[in-house]
């Protein structure tokens, strides 16, 4: 059957596009740079084997970003891509899949063609009226979307392979009855409620606290005044600025760099595109096509924008269909192919864009421009200088690092060598190292090290360093004199909370005396308060408020549809009105037990398997070509 799927193509239904989106395996075809030469360099290797190529990663990253763009539309941007570390996540995912394959091979786990066939035949989204949609329709769909059948089957195989490996590895994971019941109650017992919050800012009067009061509060609440963990280290820091005189960039090097990287400096072709889109469904497809075909005959460069405002049914209609220089790159493959063949001010024939029929016009077309060396000379100079500085500083520090033994004291060892070291003192993760690292890179590295460990190279904004972790200062209760100001703030805040409890108690009684919702609304408005809905689950915090001992007992004993007595937190007071209280009985648990157990055991096994794979990944020698990674990001990200 799989051979048939790879060889037979006949019919295609556009509605299956919705099916493949929900399938969620990530096979949406995407190639923003058709026809471009793909570099076959290795991006990542495992234990010395070349496993992920430039082109493999490039394609998967582009597909992933397009999926995000399709889901989020104009809300998706480059800032999000970098913040969410999507390029790194995609590469890690590819590496993880390959390690799953290696681990499965070690355990003699394999997947047969019959298993792949069965998975495809029985996948719910490929069913029509309870039966598989048929080889021809299925294969035609893959072909239409530009998805290679063998690649599709490989992805299905990887999915089954991971399931088998996970099942074998997690076979011993169980949940005992007591734990299962606790999980059930925490998840199922709920209180649907409205709450009113009284914040300390409502208290306008000046409040004071004497030394005796502060001391008594401190003694009774010492655990509130624990210090953070701090660490101290010794560093040999070489700033780039101190070595600039030792490097020189020649005109020959600038020229050669320009020639070798000329493709990166080409100013690409600029295309500005406008679109008119008329949507259709299965019943109106033919009718809409006739309208679009007639509309095409009326269009020219002068009336296109007005017609788009009048009849177009997409998000850019109000702007005359203008998709600018970049947003059109998210059009369908058929539309992008048409755009590449069009001239300035030319108007396309109607195109089936899956959600509707579109007509395109190129409103501006600027040819690609060859780069001129002088336009890029300064940037090239800066890049070459930085590259040479990195190499020089790394080489100098490496000579020092190579003389160090595992348990050497860095400060003592370097005295005889006449090398200056810097002692960080006890600092927190992210703290600056004065006159060395203003961004906290070095301090964060200290918090990933073991005592006496020496790390190299450690890069920071201004240079490179050798770093040794000397001591770890564990958290402890800080003396009163040191935290007196903090104690005072808490005491004053407690007094405010006490005043708010009084206010909340009076309001609760007043609200409970009212039956008219309008009067309740007016009363809250007059006091600059508002009622908001929420849900409380057993054993959890209430929203993001501080922990409150005994909150379960309070919430699950509330009288329904009555405002409660004040509930005090560290930083506010609330009153609540329970609208519905759900408490599951032992009988409910027994009725739901099987389904709930299966759900929780799967969650536990997934967590166990993630931990297992994390340890396995650490056991492999994985090398990344970071320079190539950055190059790909620079090429792909601007398109989004």
Image (tube, rainbow, N blue to C red):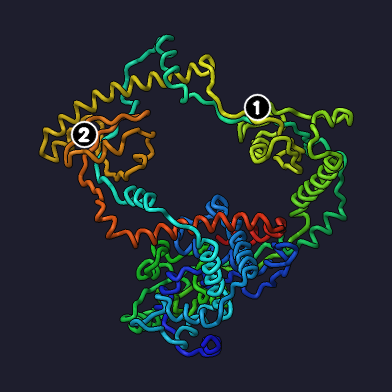
Element class at badge 2: loop
Q: Residues within 10 Å of mark 2 (few under 14, many from 20)?
A: many
- Residue depicted at x 66% and y 54%: 618
Residue closest to the eye, 120 or 198? 120
Q: Quadrant of residue 30?
A: bottom right
- Left or right of 164 in this view: 400: right
Q: Which residue is mark 1?
A: 426
Q: Is residue 495 above or below residue 595?
A: above
Quadrant, the C terminus:
bottom right
Q: Which residue is mark 2?
A: 564
Q: Is residue 79 above or below residue 118?
A: above
Element class at badge 1: loop
- Residue depicted at x 73% and y 27%: 423
**First in residue order: circle 2 vs circle 1:** 1
Q: Can residue 467 be seen from the camera position used here?
A: yes
Q: Quadrant of residue 275?
A: bottom left
Q: Is residue 154 above or below residue 197?
A: below
Residue closest to the eye, 454 or 623? 454
Q: Position of residue 19 (x, y in %)?
A: 41, 74
Q: Can residue 463 be seen from the camera position used here?
A: no
Compute the Cα span from label 2 to label 1: 48 Å
């Amino acid at each position: 059957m799989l051979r048939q799927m790879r060889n037979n193509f006949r019919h295609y239904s556009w509605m299956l596009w919705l099916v493949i989106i929900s399938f969620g395996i990530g096979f949406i075809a995407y190639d923003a740079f058709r026809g471009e030469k793909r570099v076959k360099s290795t991006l990542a290797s495992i234990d010395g084997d070349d496993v992920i190529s430039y082109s493999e990663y490039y394609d998967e990253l582009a597909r992933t970003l397009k999926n995000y763009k399709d889901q989020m539309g104009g809300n998706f941007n480059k800032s999000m891509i970098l913040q969410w570390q999507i390029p790194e996540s995609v590469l890690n995912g590819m590496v993880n899949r390959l390690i799953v394959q290696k681990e499965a091979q070690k355990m003699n786990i394999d997947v047969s063609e019959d298993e792949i066939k069965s998975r495809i035949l029985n996948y719910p989204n490929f069913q029509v009226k309870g039966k598989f949609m048929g080889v021809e329709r299925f294969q035609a769909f893959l072909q239409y979307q530009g998805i290679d059948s063998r690649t599709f089957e490989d992805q299905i195989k990887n999915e089954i392979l991971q399931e088998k490996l996970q099942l074998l590895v997690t076979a011993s994971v169980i949940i005992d009855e007591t734990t299962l019941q606790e999980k059930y109650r925490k998840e199922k017992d709920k209180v649907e409620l409205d709450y009113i919050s009284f914040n300390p800012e409502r208290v306008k009067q000046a409040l004071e606290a004497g030394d005796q009061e502060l001391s008594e509060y401190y003694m009774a609440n010492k655990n509130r005044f624990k210090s953070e963990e701090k660490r101290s280290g010794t560093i040999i820091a070489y700033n780039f600025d101190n070595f600039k005189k030792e490097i020189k960039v020649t005109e020959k090097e600038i020229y050669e760099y320009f020639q070798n990287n000329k493709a990166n400096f080409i100013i690409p072709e600029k295309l500005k595109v406008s679109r008119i889109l008329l949507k259709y469904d299965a019943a109106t497809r033919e009718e809409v096509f006739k309208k679009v075909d007639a509309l095409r005959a009326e269009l020219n460069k002068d009336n296109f924008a007005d017609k788009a405002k009048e009849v177009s049914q997409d998000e850019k209609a109000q702007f005359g269909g203008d998709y600018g220089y970049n947003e059109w790159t998210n059009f369908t493959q058929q539309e992008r192919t048409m755009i590449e063949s069009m001239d300035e001010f030319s108007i396309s024939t109607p195109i089936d864009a899956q959600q509707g029929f579109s007509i395109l016009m190129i409103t501006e077309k600027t040819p690609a421009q060859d780069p001129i060396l002088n336009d890029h000379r300064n940037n090239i100079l800066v890049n070459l200088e930085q590259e040479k500085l990195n190499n020089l500083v790394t080489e100098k520090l490496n000579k020092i690092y190579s003389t160090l033994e595992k348990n050497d004291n860095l400060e003592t060892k370097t005295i005889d060598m006449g090398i200056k070291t810097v002692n960080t003192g006890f600092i927190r993760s992210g703290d600056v190292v004065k006159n060395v690292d203003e961004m906290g890179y070095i301090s964060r590295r200290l918090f990933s090290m073991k005592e006496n460990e020496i790390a190299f190279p450690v890069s920071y904004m201004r240079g490179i360093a050798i770093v040794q972790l000397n001591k770890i200062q564990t958290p402890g209760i800080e003396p009163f004199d040191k935290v007196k100001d903090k104690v005072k703030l808490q005491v004053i805040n407690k007094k405010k909370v006490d005043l708010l409890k009084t206010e909340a108690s009076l309001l609760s009684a007043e609200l409970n005396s009212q039956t008219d919702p309008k009067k309740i609304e007016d009363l809250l408005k007059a006091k600059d308060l508002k009622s908001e809905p929420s849900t409380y689950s057993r054993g959890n915090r209430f929203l993001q408020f501080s922990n409150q001992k005994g909150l379960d007992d309070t919430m699950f004993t509330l009288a329904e549809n009555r405002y409660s007595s004040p509930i005090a937190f560290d930083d506010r007071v609330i009153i609540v009105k329970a609208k519905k209280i759900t408490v599951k009985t032992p009988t409910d648990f027994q009725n739901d037990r099987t389904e709930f157990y299966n759900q929780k055991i799967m969650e536990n096994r997934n967590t166990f398997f993630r931990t297992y794979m994390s340890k396995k990944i650490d056991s492999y020698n994985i090398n990344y070509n970071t320079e190539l990674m950055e190059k790909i990001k620079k090429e792909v990200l601007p398109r989004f």
